[in-house]
């Protein structure tokens, strides 16, 4: 995870003490430490960008799902207001009409040949 890539905690940065040479801090040690801090910040920034992108995608998905939910609720309300009872007889009549259309065309094509 991201914590494996982070070298220093804020408290470690605050408590960091550099060794002092005759001319001051050892520049190489300070530069190395600052390079690690910079690396940590870059890691944080990359993680933040990824999380922001993921958050945006999830918000868009939530909005899409909310819209779908509204549409389904409206469809349910409309269906409740206009109940249309479909009986087995209606289904059989529709199947019969479809069979006539499908098989009727097939018979005509065979007769023409």
Image (spheres, grey):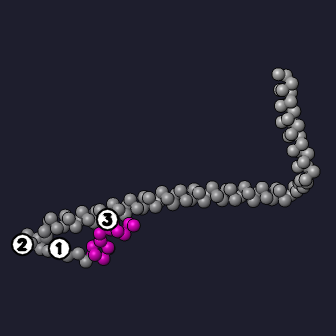
Of helix, strand and loop, which one carries label 3?
helix
Q: Name the disc covering residue 22, or none.
A: 2
Q: Is residue 13 left or right of residue 56?
A: left
- Closer to the chain start, of discs 1 and 3, is 1
Q: Residue 92 appears at what percent x and percent y?
A: 90, 48
Q: Which residues are magenta?
A: 1-14
Question: In which quadrant of the rendered view does residue 40 lie?
Answer: bottom left
Q: Name the disc covering residue 89, or none.
A: none
Of helix, strand and loop, which one carries label 2?
loop
Q: Which one is closest to the eye, mark 1 or mark 3?
A: 3
Q: CA distance from mark 1 to mark 3?
A: 19 Å
CB-based contact (under 8 Å), mark 1 and mark 2: no
Q: Name the disc covering residue 40, or none.
A: 3
Q: How many residues crowd around disc 2 within 10 Å: few (fewer than 14), some, or many (20 or more)?
A: few
Q: Residue 80 appears at what percent x and percent y?
A: 84, 59
Q: Residue 22 appears at what percent x and percent y?
A: 6, 72
Q: Residue at x 91, y 54 (%)?
A: 87
Dominant SS of magenta comes to: helix
Q: CA distance from mark 1 to mark 2?
A: 13 Å
Of helix, strand and loop, which one carries label 1?
loop
Q: How many residues crowd around disc 1 within 10 Å: few (fewer than 14), some, or many (20 or more)?
A: few
The residue at which mark 1 appears reads as 18
Q: Magenta span has 6?
A: yes
Q: CA distance from mark 3 to mark 2?
A: 30 Å
Q: How many residues crowd around disc 3 within 10 Å: few (fewer than 14), some, or many (20 or more)?
A: some
The C terminus lies in which quarter of the figure?
A: top right
Q: Is residue 52 left or right of residue 8?
A: right
């Amino acid at each position: 995870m991201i914590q494996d890539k982070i070298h220093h905690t804020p408290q470690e940065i605050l408590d960091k003490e550099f060794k002092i040479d005759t001319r001051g801090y050892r520049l190489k040690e300070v530069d190395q430490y600052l390079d690690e801090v910079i690396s940590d910040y870059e890691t944080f920034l990359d993680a933040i960008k990824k999380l922001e992108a993921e958050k945006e995608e999830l918000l868009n998905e939530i909005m899409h799902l909310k819209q779908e939910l509204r549409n389904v609720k409206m469809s349910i309300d409309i269906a409740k207001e206009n109940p249309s009872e479909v009986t087995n007889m209606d289904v059989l009549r529709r199947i019969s009409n479809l069979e006539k259309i499908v098989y009727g065309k097939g018979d005509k094509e065979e007769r023409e040949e």
